[in-house]
Each structure stands twice: as structure tokens, then as C-alpha cells.
Image (cartoon, helix red, strand yellow):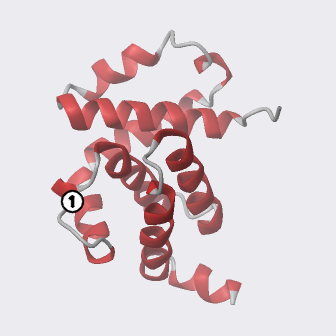
Amino acid sequence: MTTKSARRRSREFALQGLYAWLVSRSDAGAIAAQFADAQGMARADQSFFTQLLDGAIRQATELDAAMQPAIDRPVSELSPVEHAILLLAVFELMNFPEVPYRVVINEAVELAKSFGGTDGHKYVNGVLDKLAKSLRPHDVAAQK
């Protein structure tokens, strides 16, 4: 069994928080507070979790607009899990240039495999591949 990195745990908790926010539209602080004592949270990168959850909620409208050209339907028709994963990954692509875009995509695909529908990871991968070209053009070009 492989152990999860602190950042992977942070992404998992942030995904769950974003899902809860998408479903309930509760206050971000209240959602974050629900995770304070969650099992495994002590092994997560708390600062990264807070940055991801708060930032993705705060920038949700901008993130939805950024992802719209790469998705094949209105954002409102995405499953809440895929929507939350894409919000998280697009936020990370746009705000954490020090994290390689391939790492962001891989982490999102792994989240989709764990939490999403049967082929959700393929959809998430395709959308993020397209978005990486526009959000991180220099990084993508450097990989070729």
C-alpha cells in the first residue's frame, strides 16, 4: 500500500469541501471547519488545503469561465464531483505555477478515479489537457 502525500490528502479534502459547497452553497469557512477534525486531516498540508478550498470557492465564477471552452456542455450540467475536480485543478493551474501542469492533471485524474464516475477520469484528463495549453502555454511547449 502506498502512502499518500500531504498534498494529495489536501486535494482530497479540498475536493470534498468543494463538492459540499457546490451542493449546499454553504459558507467556505463553515465547510472548512467541518474538516478540521476529519480523520486523516492531521496528515494533510493544512495551508495548501485552505488555499485550495478558499481560493477555488472565491474564484469559482472565473474558474468556470476558464473551463467552459474545454468542456462539451454547460458547467451546470457537469456532475458535482467532476465540477469540483475541475474547479480544483483549474484553480491550481492558474494559481500555483510552481506545481508542474502534468502533476496537476495527474492528481485530478487520480481524484476522478477515486471519487468520480466510471469514465469521469477520462473526461477530466481530456478537459485539463486542453486547458493546460491555454493556461500554461510555456510549460506545455517546454514539454514537447
Image location (x, y in percent) of residue 91:
41, 55
Q: Residue at x 69, y 84 (%)?
A: 143
**Is 84 placed above or below 53 here?**
below
Q: Residue at x 26, y 73 (%)?
A: 72
Image location (x, y in percent) of residue 93:
48, 63
Q: Which quadrant of the structure image shows residue 23?
A: top left
Q: Is residue 48 visible?
A: no
Image location (x, y in percent) of residue 13:
49, 30
Left or right, 62 with reference to 37:
left
- SS class, disc 1: helix
Image location (x, y in percent) of residue 30:
29, 18
Left or right, 61 with reference to 102:
left
In the orientation shown, which residue stands out farthest toward the front? Answer: 118
The residue type indicated by label 1 comes to: Val
In the orientation shown, which residue stands out farthest toward the right? Answer: 1
Residue density around tag 1, few if under 14, some if 14–19, many if 20 or more, within 10 Å: some
Per the image, the residue denoted by label 1 is 75
